[in-house]
Image (spheres, grey):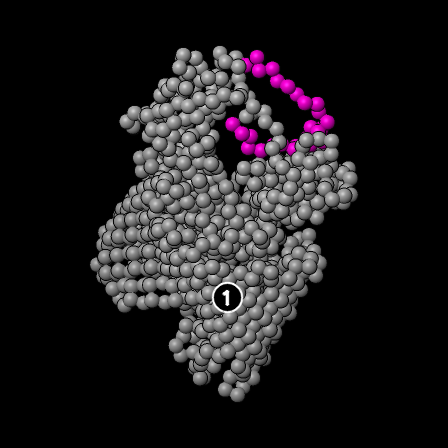
Amino acid sequence: MACAGFSLAMGVEAAETPTVKFNTAFIQGSDQPADLSEFIRGNSVVPGVYRVDVYVNRALSGRRDITFKQKAGSALVEPCLGLEMLQDFGLDLGRVQEKGGAISDQGCFDLVGQVQFAHIEYQPTTLRLNISVPQAYMARSARGYVAPELWDVGETTGFINYNFNGTQRRNSQLDTDQYYLGLRNGLNLGAWRLRNEASLTYGNHQPYRYRSNRTYAQRDLTDWRSQLTLGETYTDSQIFDSVRFKGAAIASDDGMLPDSERVFAPVIRGIAETNALVEVRQNGFLLYSGNVSPGPFEISDIYPSGSNGDLEVTVIEADGRRRSFTQAYASLPIMLPAGALRYGVAAGQVDNYGTDQASPNFLSATLVYGLSERLTGYGGVQVAEDYQAGNVGMGVNTGLGAVSADLTQSISKVRGQDRVGESLRLRYANTLDLTNTTLAVAGYRYSTEHYRTLNDHVEEAARAGGRLLTGLAKDRLEMSVSQALPEQLGFVSLTASEQRYWNLSGKTRQFYVSYNAAWRSLSYSVSLERNQQSAGNGDLQTDNQLAVTLSMPLGSNPGSSRAWFNGVRDSRGDYTTQAGLSGQVLEDRDTFYSVQAGHDSYSGSSGAGKLDTTTAFGRFNAGYSQGRDFHAVSVGAAGSLVAHRGGLNAGQPLGETFALVEVPDVAGARLGNFNNVQTSGNGYAVMPYAQPYRANWVSLDTRSLGADVDLDTAITQVVPRRGAVPVVHFKAALGRRVQFELVRADGSRLPMGASVEDANGKLLAVVDPASRALVLSEQEQGELSVRWSDQRCRAPFSLPPRDSARAYERLRVVCQ
């Protein structure tokens, strides 16, 4: 069998080592002299220039034209890697010198000789160059970064990503039906991505209502490391509050850069008394709708539009009771590395849903620049009809955390009256390793009475002297802290916010604290939620809820069911208690059940049950609950439909960027790194999410393929652009697995190492010491060609009828 590659790990020493000859007489188990020529064949690469994929520490790092040269005084052919090229791949030359390496640009750098434990391997059959370098010699900024020439634009694809939730409640006073369908639709055409985000709601007390949140076309501007967006979307900026508009925008994309920064996504925490429906809105648009179980809940997969805008959370209990609170949302402190630049420019018409609001033209521009490793400067301007705003700020990275402060001044002219106001904003974030404390975000903002955001100005101008429906913010304080306790005593988390307004009396407060710990196999938590909202007369309406949760497995098996208890009591003395079981349905690791019984001061005794399942085609759930004077049914479904050149595939819910995996003519091939994702009858599977501009490993679970499928490789990488849908191809051969026993006409065996080929000369296997060869035959009958040394013979065969009970066939054939 031909070697897949050759090793250059010890290139210098290998070139000076004399030729080694092996005595094949020591090989046992064969009555014929072994032919090992295919195994000991030397380097067969011809000197020249080859375009190869370069993998550095197993990560795809670039596609380059590499010159292969024959080393002086040796038959060894090596790739010529220059210093500039190695730096592009992430080698830190300063660290090489620090550790005793000699740096001299003589054309080809001796990586193996100068860097201890470095290794280079070339695989000519796949045009792949593997470079292994100890992490201590790699530049930190380059880790994980992939060169732009490898970013995959993907293929023409259309998709629908849906999230459906339906609830029917029946009680003695009111029957309520409520249905929600969230849609994220897309069409990729070349470098352009068309997107639409919308929702459809319906109920027996409201008509069908379709609402579009965003509709836009977008594409990469690779040279600028930016995104161009056209259509109906939001300004994406950390400087000013987000504005929904129709127009065009160009903004930096941090994902394209080596030192990317993550987008801060808020975590919604609260307490549900029953199997409740939780809805999250921002600026009136329904971002999320889903069912939660009784007790404390945490929702972290919410991605608000823009960078600011409070989140309105509504908890609808099984018996119809509604509770609402507001959670403040703002981005983290603004910090950039030295020399890094981020910008955003947007122009168009303001579009804030309201039919009675004006749609003035506007221009918004922001700039953030890293002045040094500790100092970041930023600012921006917004200009619209009768409105101007300017911002200037600074971010400082200190030993106690990152702090940013900025000042915004606005000039708003409404009905001939100029209003000039200012808004001061402070933000702080830190992780204290010494105490295991994470202060995720802490912010304070104070605005004068005449300060107006662009959204405030548009609404105020449209109402012609009427009172603003929204509050004019006076000050806002928000924070989120998590603390791990010593000696494994548990974990404490805290989220709090307070908001006051100039034009509304009172204030809004939200406070949530929880303590989680475990004793042996018993897990327990205690949480307190406190919400305060203005009653309109200066008083605050206070709602306190205290919850206790216990959970314990009923066995040592990882799939064992769990028993749990949950109790909630509020400040009015009302209470809810629930106890139940949850776990896997039989041995199905993708389907889970939950049954419970409880008692509360509203409905007396009650019971409920729920089923959740995840399939290759989506996620589905159904639940039922009943009390003394009510019963409720809920169903949910989330998934996707993807249309592409290979057909139509249903899949699980999609991320912003996803991929298609193709295994031609093979159905049921499972992805090894995604739960319950497998190919359909057309040979395609929907890989639900991928990280843009980074190498994503894609692997197949070969155990699910069966013996009659053979893969060239079971693992590969893909580097998609943002929003792209690349197709990951796996080359598969289909046939029947057969163990041929090869003998000559006189019954003697063939030599070990003999090559077994098909009629077209394709290498199928090599002969083992017992004169057998395991072959994947794509034909029911044909002829095998066996060669060794200077000899050759042919073995015709005809396979017996397929026996499904056998993993492979055994067949004795004569080679003549």
Residue 469 x %, y % = 43, 75
**Residue displayed at 55% across by 44% down:** 484
**Residue displayed at 46% across by 78% down:** 359
Say which element carries label 1.
Answer: strand
Q: Is residue 23 magenta?
A: yes
Q: Is residue 197 visible?
A: yes
Residue 246 x %, y % = 46, 72
Residue 481 higher or lower than 681, as above or below:
below
- Residue topped by disc 1: 229
Span highlighted in magenta in the image:
1-27
Of residue 195 and residue 235, the one placed in the foreground of this image is 195
**Residue displayed at 26% across by 60% down:** 177
Of residue 136 and residue 522, the one placed in the foreground of this image is 136
Residue 669 higher or lower than 471, as above or below:
above
Q: In the picture, which quadrant includes the C terminus?
A: top left
- Count up the numbered dots: 1
Tell me: 43 left or right of 306. Answer: right
Q: Is residue 592 visible?
A: no
Instruction: Please tell me in which quadrant of the rendered image residue 524 appears.
Output: top left
Tell me: 598 left or right of 543. Answer: left
**Residue displayed at 68% across by 45% down:** 86
Tell me: 289 left or right of 245. Answer: left
Residue 759 higher or lower than 664, as above or below:
above
Amino acid under label 1?
A: Thr
Tell me: 51 left or right of 680. Answer: right
Residue 729 x %, y % = 45, 44
Q: Is residue 577 magenta?
A: no
Of residue 508 and residue 610, the one placed in the foreground of this image is 610
Residue 607 x %, y % = 27, 46
